[in-house]
């Protein structure tokens, strides 16, 4: 593992050379500081061309994120803080795209659960029956 790799999960490390960083002036208020400082950070990662993912992982990430992942951070005045935010967001997006839900195992309701369900239905039926006007035969 190279020191300049970005660790996403235990098995996935993305070389920082594959991530393109761009800096631009941040929009919005801030006066001269916002006009002169390139504090907005944009990360772009070409998923299709990446060597960091196996074929199954690449297919899953492409399906969920598309061919290029783009993350932007311009929340803070500091470029360093925006870089850290961009890295956190990038890692979170890739982790969520790589996540595989465990398969659901079908289960049957227990006897007690069935009985409670039927008792509830019976109680509700009696409540509604008590609201009716008494009939001719009752």
Image: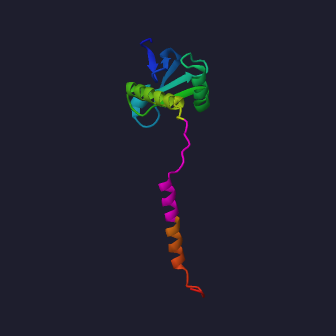
- Residue depicted at 53% across the width and 65% down the height: 121
Specify whether residue 108 is painted magenta: yes
Residue 125 place in picture, x, y as percent: 54, 71
Q: Residue furthest front?
A: 111
| Residue 10 falls in image quadrant | top left
Quarter of image, res 48: top right
Residue at horizontal 60 percent and vertical 18 percent from the top: 49
Q: Which residues are magenta?
A: 103-120
Is 46 located above or below residue 129 in the figure?
above
Q: On the rendered image, what quadrant is the N terminus found in? A: top left
**How far across and down, in percent of the image, does residue 94 sit?**
51, 28
Residue 67 on image: x %, y %: 61, 26
In the picture shown, does residue 112 fall above or below 134? above
Residue at 57%, 18% (x, y): give it: 50
Nearer to me, 11 or 85:
11
Front residue (pair 124, 138) = 138
Across and down, in percent, residue 110 comes to 50, 51
Q: In the displayed structure, does residue 55 sit left or right of residue 93?
A: right
- Report the front residue among 125 and 111: 111
């Amino acid at each position: 593992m190279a020191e300049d790799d970005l660790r996403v999960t235990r098995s996935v490390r993305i070389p920082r050379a594959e991530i393109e960083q761009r800096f631009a002036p941040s929009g919005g208020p801030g006066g001269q500081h916002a006009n002169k400082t390139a504090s907005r950070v944009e990360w772009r990662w070409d998923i299709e061309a990446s060597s960091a993912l196996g074929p199954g992982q690449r297919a899953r990430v492409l399906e969920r994120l598309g061919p290029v992942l783009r993350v932007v951070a311009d929340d803070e005045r500091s470029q360093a803080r925006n870089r850290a935010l961009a890295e956190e967001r990038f890692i979170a997006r890739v982790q969520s795209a790589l996540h595989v839900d465990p398969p659901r195992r079908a289960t049957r309701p227990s006897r007690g659960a069935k009985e409670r369900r039927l008792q509830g239905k019976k109680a509700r039926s009696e409540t509604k029956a008590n609201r009716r006007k008494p009939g001719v035969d009752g």
